[in-house]
Image (cartoon, rainbow, N blue to C red):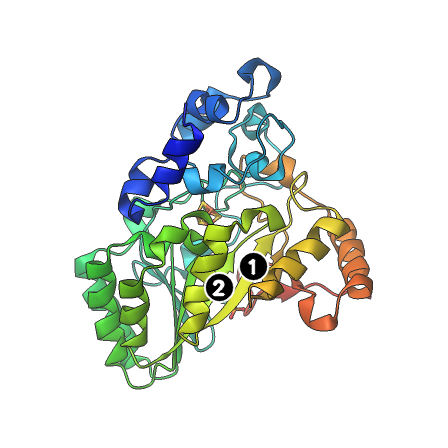
């Protein structure tokens, strides 16, 4: 078990080392959190479809001895994942038809989203891509050339979104090569990074990474992914400050998750904490109905009530937009708060 001293030491290691030490078994994670496996609804069978993966930097923010912890619920494989729920499927957001070219999703006007990798630093149990055929669709060095050609010839695309998986799991060398190509495409105005790493592996935000982004000469936008205020540790706070110091904009997207952040008080606190760190709440997503995630679903009518409560408790600019993804739609669908 990690004691306090080795935990402190862990945070002095570089991000690749930290990543290689991430928890990969239910036993290890529960031992670290001082939890009895027999008191939890865990399922090893659920890890067969989608492995457990939790960086120590995220696990350190989970409360010890609390089976109900909202961060734990995001990462612990439980038997509910094996239940079939009506309306839940393997490709709920229609990514497969939009994948017009390997590694590129071009669903929305002016924006192209690149699936730079299928990997993540963490495996969120509610992830809509847990069933996604990544190995076929993600970019490799070869297809990256085709993609940059595609972007160069589509002069209507002004923003490229690096996504995945998590694009920041790529090495600085891989990213630098890609960013260099993107920087030479004149009609691209913005490079957007969709990443959960600033939250779950803040050591990834290195001066070298930030410099590589800055060197593109494009406007840089981060969209991080944080679901609960407890995820914002002092390490996360410092990583966010480093990004802000470059003058980059940071937005946050969350997924509305039963048992994690489905209370108005939790969402209010999340928005407040984010803004303290200079991060603007952007989207609150209704769960994408991916097989294995049904137990996380919050109904649309409850979601609307939550947003109404936030509108009362928060300034308007701290209320995230409630959205859902709809296959074949020209944008994320904004849910009407009547
Ligand atoms: C979400 C998404 C975007 C970005 O949408 P915004 O509303 O601009 O944040 C772009 N492309 C794809 C395929 C997406 O899923
Ligand atoms: S970080 Fe994002 S893409 Fe990765 S597992 Fe979590 S929700 Fe899915």
Q: Position of residue 310 (x, y in %)?
A: 77, 60
Kindly tell me whether residue 3 is visible in this rendering.
yes
Looking at the rendered structure, the secondary structure element under dot 2 is strand
Looking at the rendered structure, the secondary structure element under dot 1 is strand
Kindly tell me whether residue 52 is visible in this rendering.
no
Queried on whether the Cβ of the residue with tag 2 lies below 8 angstroms from ligand 1, the answer reads yes
Q: Nearer the viewer, residue 74 or 133?
A: 74
Q: Residues within 10 Å of mark 2 (few under 14, many from 20)?
A: many
173 on left or right of 298: left
Determine the residue positioned at 26% across, 67% down. 147
The residue at which mark 2 appears reads as 223
Q: Position of residue 141 (x, y in %)?
A: 18, 58
Mark 2 and mark 1 in contact? Answer it, CB < 8 Å.
Answer: yes
> Where on the picture, by quarter, is residue 259?
top right
8 on left or right of 309: left
> CA separation, marks 2 and 1?
7 Å
18 on left or right of 263: left
The residue at which mark 1 appears reads as 253
Q: Position of residue 35 (x, y in %)?
A: 55, 21
The answer to which of marks 2 and 1 sits earlier in the sequence is: 2
């Amino acid at each position: 078990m990690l004691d306090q001293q080795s935990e402190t030491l862990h945070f002095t290691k570089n991000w690749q080392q930290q990543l290689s030490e991430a928890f990969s078994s239910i036993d290890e994670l529960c031992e670290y959190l001082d939890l009895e496996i027999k008191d939890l609804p865990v399922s090893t069978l659920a890890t067969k479809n989608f492995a457990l993966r939790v960086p120590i930097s995220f696990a350190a923010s989970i409360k010890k001895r609390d089976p109900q912890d909202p961060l734990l619920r995001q990462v612990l494989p439980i038997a509910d994942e094996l239940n079939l729920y009506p309306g839940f499927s393997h490709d709920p957001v229609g990514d497969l038809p939009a994948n017009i070219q390997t590694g590129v999703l071009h669903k929305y006007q002016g924006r192209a989203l690149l699936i730079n990798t299928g990997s993540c630093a963490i495996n969120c149990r509610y992830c809509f891509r847990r069933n996604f055929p990544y190995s076929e669709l993600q970019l490799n060095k070869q297809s990256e050339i085709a993609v940059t050609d595609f972007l160069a010839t589509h002069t209507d695309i002004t923003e490229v979104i690096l996504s995945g998986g998590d694009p920041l799991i790529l090495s600085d060398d891989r990213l630098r090569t890609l960013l260099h190509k993107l920087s030479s495409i004149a009609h691209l105005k913005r490079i957007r990074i969709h990443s959960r790493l600033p939250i779950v592996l803040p050591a990834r935000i290195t001066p070298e990474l930030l410099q590589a982004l800055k060197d593109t000469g494009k406007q840089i936008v981060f969209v991080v992914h944080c679901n609960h205020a407890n995820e914002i540790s002092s390490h996360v706070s410092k990583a966010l400050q480093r990004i802000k110091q470059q003058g980059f904009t940071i937005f946050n997207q969350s997924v509305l998750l039963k048992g994690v952040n489905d209370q108005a008080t939790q969402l209010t606190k999340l928005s407040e904490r984010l803004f303290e760190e200079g991060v603007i709440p952007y989207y609150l997503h209704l769960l994408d109905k991916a097989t294995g995630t049904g137990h996380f679903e919050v109904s649309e009518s409850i979601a609307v009530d939550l947003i109404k409560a936030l509108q009362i408790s928060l300034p308007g600019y701290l209320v995230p937009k409630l959205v859902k993804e709809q296959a074949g739609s020209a944008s994320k669908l904004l849910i009407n708060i009547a």
